Image (spheres, helix red, strand yellow):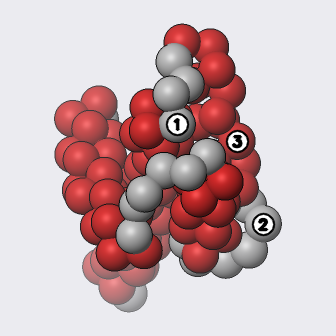
Amino acid sequence: MSQFDDREKAAENQFSHNKELEFKATARRNKLLGLWAAGLMGLDGDAAAAYARQVIESDFEETGEEDVYRKVKGDLDDKGCDQSEHQVRKQMEDLMIEALSQVKAEI
């Protein structure tokens, strides 16, 4: 029975590690997305960093990434930045890959 318990504990640890990695990568992606959008809106320095924090915080409104998409797309539209839904979603996908790579490199 000890071998089964060890396997179960290892599986639980791996699941926990994967969830933590996913959380960190998503937060990093949102930061990178915020900085990308800030650049398109003409923000830099502290203003860009503050906007990136707003994007990170917007992810806590609901489950999934639609809240982040709506925030960024709405802000881009409000500032007259011509970015299609496809462009924003593609940027989110690309930045998730980059963020996951960055977070894994830090481990």
Mark-to-mark CA distance, 2 and 1: 23 Å
Residue 66 locus on image (x, y percent):
59, 75
Q: Position of residue 76 (x, y in %)?
A: 56, 53
Residue that badge 2 annotates: 61
Q: Residue furthest top?
A: 45
Give the structural element (helix, strand or loop) at label 2: loop
For mark 3, give the secondary structure. helix
Q: Residue at x 42, y 74 (%)?
A: 85
- The quadrant the C terminus occupies is top left
Q: Nearer the viewer, residue 23 or 75?
A: 75
Dot 2 crowding, Cα within 10 Å, few <14, some 14–19, many 20+: few
- Measured in 3D between alpha carbons, the distance from the residue under mark 1 to the one under mark 3, in whole angstroms, is 14 Å
Residue type at mark 1 is Met
Residue 50 sits in which quadrant? top right
> Label 1's element?
loop
Based on the displayed image, in which of its 4 quarters is residue 46 positioned? Answer: top right
Q: Residues within 10 Å of mark 3 (few under 14, many from 20)?
A: some
**Callout 2 amino acid:** Glu
Q: Residue at x 31, y 52 (%)?
A: 95
Q: Amino acid at mark 3?
A: Gln
- Of label 2 and label 3, which has the lower sequence position? 3
65 sits to left or right of 104 = right
User: Residues under labels 2 and 3: Cα distance?
Assistant: 11 Å
Checking the image for residue 41, the label placed there is: 1
Question: Which of 14/45 is in front?
Answer: 45
Judging by the rendered image, the residue that carries numbered circle 3 is 54
**Image: 71 above or below 12:** above
Q: Is residue 2 visible?
A: no
* On screen, residue 45 above or below 24: above
